[in-house]
Image (cartoon, rainbow, N blue to C red):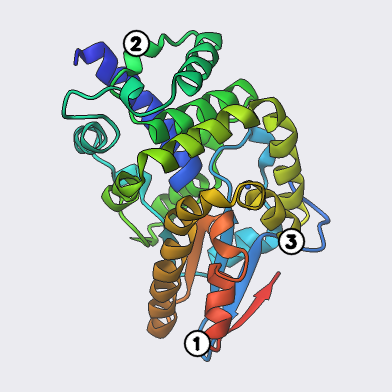
C-alpha cells in the first residue's frame, strides 16, 4: 500500500477514534448536566458523559462540570489520545481493519450493499477502490465521520480533548480506562454478517443523521439521560440482530470500566472520569452498575 493511502487512512482513523470509541453549548440554565457524582467517605468521583466531536460554541461548559474537574486530582479517560504513537496506530489499524489474506470488501458483503457504499463514498469524493481491502465496520465508521464533518463537527472541540488539554496545563495525573489497542481489536471478532448489518444500518441512517445528531445535542444540553438513551439505543430496538454489536461495543466494556471506576473510588484521590455518554446509560451502563455495587450516584 502506498504512502498516500496510508496517510488517508490515518486521517480517517483519527476522526473515527475520537468520535466513536473515545463513545453526545456555552450551556447555561439547564436543570441537569450530563455529570454524575459518586459519593463515598472520601472525595467524590465524577462521571462525565462526553461527546467527542463538537463546535466552538459548546463552550463554556456548565459550571458544575468545570468545578468537578477543578476539584478532582486525577483525570480518567477511555484512551489518552495525546499519547497515541502514529506509527503504532497505523500498524494496529492495518492489521485489524484491513484484510490481510488477499480478500477484499467485495468478498464479504452483498453486491447491493457494495453498490450503495460506492455511491455514498462518491458523494464525498472518495473512490471505493482506495478502500478495497477495508473491512465493513471500518467503512461504516468512516462514512459516519464524513457525515459529521459535513455537518460542521470537529474533534478538536471534543470534550475529551478539552479536559485532556486542561489536565496537561494544570499538571494533573491522567489515567486510561482502556487502551487504543484493545478498542481497535474488539471489532475483529465481529462476523461478516454483523459487520454488514452495521454498515447497512449506517447507509440507511444517512438521511436522518442531521436530525438525530441535533436531538442528541439537545438531550446532552438538558441532561436528559432517558432521551439520550432512547436515541443511542434506537438502532438496537429497530434491529435486534445488532445485539452482538452492542454487547461488544457497550455492555462488556461498561462492566470493565465500572470495575475500573470502583478501583479509583478506593484510592480516595478524587477522579474526574470522562467516557462516551452511551457508556453511562441504561440498565447495563456504568451508573447502574455502580449503584448495584452499593454506591450512591447522583446526577448533577
- Residue 160 horizontal/vertical position (percent): 49, 48
Dot in front, 3 or 1: 3
Choose between 63 and 182: the one closer to the eye: 182
Is residue 209 found left or right of 98 in the rendered image? Answer: right
Instruction: Tell us which disc is closer to us: 2 or 3.
Output: 2
Say whether residue 12 is left or right of residue 181.
Answer: right
| Residue under the image location 55 percent in, 89 percent down | 294
Residue 183's spot in the image, x, y percent? 34, 50
Instruction: Tell me, for residue 129, which label it has, or none.
Output: 2
| CB within 8 Å, label 2 to label 1 | no
Q: Of discs 2 and 1, which sits in the foreground?
A: 2
| Disc 1 crowd, CA 10 A, few/some/many (<14, 14-19, 20+) | few
Q: Indicate which disc residue 104 carries.
A: none
Mark 3 surroundings within 10 Å by alpha-carbon count, few (fewer than 14), some (14 through 19), many (20 or more): few
Q: Marks 2 and 3, Cα distance to the nearest angstrom?
A: 42 Å
Q: Earlier in the sequence, mark 2 or mark 1?
A: 1
Q: Which residue is mark 1?
A: 42
The Cα–Cα distance between marks 3 and 1, rounded to whole angstroms, is: 29 Å
Disc with the residue nearer the chain's start (2 vs 3): 2
- Asked whether disc 2 touches disc 3, contact meaning CB atoms under 8 Å apart, the reply is no
Could you say whether the residue bearing mark 1 is in a helix, strand or loop?
loop
Amino acid at each position: 500500500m502506498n504512502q498516500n493511502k496510508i496517510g488517508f487512512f490515518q486521517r480517517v482513523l483519527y476522526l473515527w477514534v475520537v468520535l466513536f470509541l473515545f463513545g453526545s453549548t456555552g450551556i447555561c440554565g439547564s436543570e441537569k448536566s450530563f455529570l454524575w457524582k459518586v459519593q463515598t467517605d472520601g472525595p467524590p468521583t465524577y462521571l462525565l458523559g462526553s461527546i467527542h466531536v463538537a463546535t466552538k460554541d459548546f463552550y463554556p461548559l456548565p459550571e458544575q462540570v468545570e468545578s468537578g474537574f477543578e476539584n478532582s486530582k486525577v483525570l480518567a479517560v477511555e484512551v489518552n489520545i495525546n499519547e497515541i504513537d502514529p506509527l503504532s496506530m497505523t500498524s494496529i489499524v492495518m492489521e485489524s481493519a484491513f484484510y490481510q489474506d488477499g480478500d477484499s470488501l467485495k468478498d464479504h458483503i452483498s453486491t447491493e450493499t457494495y453498490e450503495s457504499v460506492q455511491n455514498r463514498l462518491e458523494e464525498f469524493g472518495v473512490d471505493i477502490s482506495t478502500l478495497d481491502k477495508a473491512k465493513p465496520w471500518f467503512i461504516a465508521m468512516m462514512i459516519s465521520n464524513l457525515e459529521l464533518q459535513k455537518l460542521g463537527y470537529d474533534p478538536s472541540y471534543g470534550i475529551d480533548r478539552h479536559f485532556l488539554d486542561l489536565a496537561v496545563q494544570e499538571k494533573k495525573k491522567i489515567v486510561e480506562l482502556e487502551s487504543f489497542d484493545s478498542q481497535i481489536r474488539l471489532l475483529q471478532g465481529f462476523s461478516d454478517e454483523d459487520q454488514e448489518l452495521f454498515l447497512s444500518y449506517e447507509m440507511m441512517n444517512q438521511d436522518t443523521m442531521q436530525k438525530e445528531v441535533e436531538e442528541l445535542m439537545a438531550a446532552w444540553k438538558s441532561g436528559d439521560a432517558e432521551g439520550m438513551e432512547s436515541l443511542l439505543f434506537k438502532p438496537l430496538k429497530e434491529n435486534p440482530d445488532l445485539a452482538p454489536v452492542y454487547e461488544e461495543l457497550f455492555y462488556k466494556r461498561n462492566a470493565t470500566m465500572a470495575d475500573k471506576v470502583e478501583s479509583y473510588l478506593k484510592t480516595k484521590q478524587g477522579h474526574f472520569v470522562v467516557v462516551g455518554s452511551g457508556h453511562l446509560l441504561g440498565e447495563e451502563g456504568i451508573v447502574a452498575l455502580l449503584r448495584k455495587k452499593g454506591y450512591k450516584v447522583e446526577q448533577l
